[in-house]
């Protein structure tokens, strides 16, 4: 059920920040290279909290996301268990062949009791992949991207 609307990138980031305001730690899971920059961007707006990134569902490869002089960066190994797990939309894209059952197993392994599952996506990725019916999301923050291109004549 839709509860709010937002506009622009800042609105997207602030919606996420509001959704995790009571958490001490957020674990992101997504596709390396595609989702990882988004995890770094979302982690930046909650830089006072602990953040972790899991590539696909590989718990052994979980890394901290920490603020550095060059921005948010993946650093040392980290414990992915968290009270908030944010699934990034790239996981549901068919070309990455991530099985929703593997995602559910990962959630079962790392989501702390009473925790929250967020979906962070664009262009209705989770809905289009049917994952909104297969994963018990507490909240999906979905952005719609539009744009223009301007060129010299």
Image: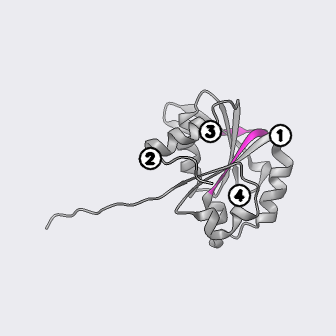
As displayed, is residue 108 above or below residue 115? below
* Residue under the point 58% across and 35% down: 18
* Residue under the point 50% across and 36% down: 71
Quick one: 147 or 102, which is closer to the camera? 147
Report how far apart the C-alphas of labels 3 and 2 lie in the structure. Answer: 16 Å
Quick one: 34 or 2, which is closer to the camera? 2
Quadrant position of residue 99 = bottom right
As displayed, is residue 40 above or below residue 88? above
- CB atoms at circles 1 and 4 under 8 Å apart? no
Span of residues in magenta: 75-88
Comes first in the chain, label 2 or label 4: 2
Report how far apart the C-alphas of labels 1 and 3 lie in the structure. Answer: 17 Å
Point out the image quarter for the C terminus.
bottom left
* Residue 56, numbered circle: 4
Question: Quick one: SS at disc 1?
Answer: strand
Residue 151 screen position, x and y as percent: 21, 64
Identify the residue under disc 3.
19
Answer yes or no: is residue 80 visible.
no
Residue 114 screen position, x and y as percent: 82, 39
Q: Is residue 84 magenta?
A: yes
* Residue 9, numbered circle: 2
């Amino acid at each position: 059920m839709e509860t709010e609307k937002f506009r622009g990138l800042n609105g997207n980031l602030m919606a996420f920040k509001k959704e995790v305001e009571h958490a001490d730690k957020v674990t992101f899971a997504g596709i390396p290279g595609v989702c990882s920059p988004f995890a770094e961007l979302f982690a930046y707006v909650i830089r006072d909290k602990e953040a972790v990134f899991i590539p696909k569902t590989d718990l052994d490869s979980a890394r901290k996301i920490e603020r550095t002089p060059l921005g948010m960066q993946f650093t040392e190994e980290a414990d992915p268990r968290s009270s908030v797990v944010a699934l990034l939309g790239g996981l549901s894209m068919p070309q990455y062949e991530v099985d929703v059952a593997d995602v559910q197993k990962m959630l079962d392994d790392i989501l702390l009791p009473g925790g929250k599952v967020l979906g962070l996506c664009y262009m209705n990725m989770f809905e289009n992949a049917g994952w909104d019916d297969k994963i018990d999301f507490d909240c999906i923050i979905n952005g719609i991207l539009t744009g223009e291109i301007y060129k010299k004549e």
